């Protein structure tokens, strides 16, 4: 980390140093899903009539309010996306969590939005694998989406994307991490002090809300277009292979 490497590289180095297990430097985290999880995702999408339509996902989940992007801005981003494209959106929510419901109250059109609320993270990952892109905060869901090959746009605030953003080339970070802060860790793993005391330490409301919904909507739409192109290519490739095998 001190040399400028990301968290993924630091973990790989720790495994090699501590366990003596060399790892391919080009290897990326890959979450292998079982048939049961894949069947759940396909059935869920078919049941809601969104199996073959443009599909994005988002989550307002966060381990701290300082790591959660504004719910109002998130709702505005959805409104802008729906105005630009005939898009279906999955919103991923933890059981018992109410931030998603509060955010959806501010969305103008909920007809093409489906809430995913399941305690099974593998099922969530299977659904994310079918999405063209995923919008989220700096959370474990960000890494799960990346590990199933879905492009990610992640909102960062007190944490440093240079460490925590997935390093697969299909993840992009936005948010207040560009704001100078003496408490933000750039060379060590672990949460900054503001997360421990649950308040901003430089007399502001929190750095994550510095990004506008306009900028986030534009970047997310770019990611959706990238994911849509990749998914179309993979579907054509699978069809060609199946035709050759037949």
Image: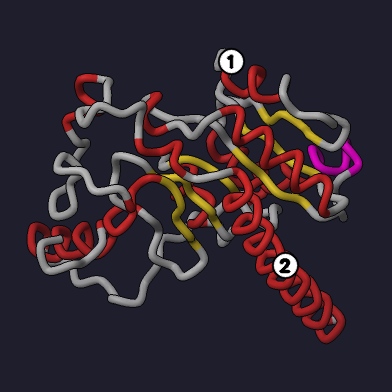
Residue 180 visible somewhere in the drawing: yes
Secondary structure type for disc 2: helix
Q: How far across and how far down the image is residue 26, in percent?
A: 35, 77
The mark found on residue 98 in the picture is 1
Task: Decide if residue 161 is on the left or right side of residue 135.
Answer: left
| Quadrant (top left, top right, bottom left, bottom right) of the C terminus | bottom right
The quadrant where residue 182 appears: top left
Q: In percent of the image, x 67 and y 42: which residue is there? A: 77
Q: Which of marks 1 and 2 is in front?
A: 1
Task: Decide if residue 186 is on the left or right side of residue 149.
Answer: left
Task: Decide if residue 137 is on the left or right side of residue 234.
Answer: left
Number of numbered discs visible in the structure rendering: 2
Is residue 48 covered in magenta?
A: yes
Q: How far across and how far down the image is residue 213, in percent?
A: 60, 43
Q: Give the range drawn in magenta.
A: 43-49
Q: How far across and how far down the image is residue 42, in percent?
A: 78, 46
| Quadrant (top left, top right, bottom left, bottom right) of the N terminus | bottom left
Secondary structure type for disc 1: loop
- Judging depth in this view, the residue of 132 and 187 nearest the camera is 187
Q: In percent of the image, x 84 and y 54: which residue is there? A: 85
Tell me whether circle 1 and circle 2 mark residues in contact (CB < 8 Å): no
Q: How far apart are marks 1 and 2 (CA)?
A: 32 Å
Q: How far across and how far down the image is residue 155, in percent?
A: 46, 45
Q: Main secondary structure of the magenta part?
A: helix
Q: Mark 2 points at which residue?
A: 231
């Amino acid at each position: 980390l001190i040399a400028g490497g990301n968290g993924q590289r630091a973990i790989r180095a720790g495994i090699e140093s501590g366990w003596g297990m060399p790892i391919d430097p080009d290897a990326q985290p890959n979450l292998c899903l079982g048939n049961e999880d894949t069947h759940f995702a396909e059935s869920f999408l078919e049941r809601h009539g969104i199996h073959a339509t443009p599909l994005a996902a988002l989550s307002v989940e966060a381990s701290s309010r300082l790591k959660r992007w504004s719910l109002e801005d998130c709702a505005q981003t959805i409104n802008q996306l729906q105005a630009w494209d005939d898009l279906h959106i999955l919103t991923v929510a933890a059981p018992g969590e109410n931030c998603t419901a509060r955010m959806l109250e501010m969305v103008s059109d909920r007809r093409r939005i489906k809430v995913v609320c399941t305690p099974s993270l593998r099922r969530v990952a299977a659904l994310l694998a079918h999405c063209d892109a995923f919008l989220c905060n700096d959370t474990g869901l960000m890494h799960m989406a990346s590990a199933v090959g879905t492009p990610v746009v992640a909102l960062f605030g007190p944490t440093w994307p240079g460490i925590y953003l997935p390093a697969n080339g299909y993840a992009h970070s936005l948010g207040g991490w560009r704001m100078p802060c003496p408490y933000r860790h750039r060379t060590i793993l672990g949460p900054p002090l503001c997360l421990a005391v649950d308040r901003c330490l430089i007399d502001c409301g929190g750095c994550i809300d510095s990004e506008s919904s306009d900028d986030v909507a534009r970047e997310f739409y770019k990611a959706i277009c990238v994911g849509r192109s990749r998914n179309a290519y993979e579907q054509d490739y699978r069809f060609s292979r199946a035709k050759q095998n037949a």
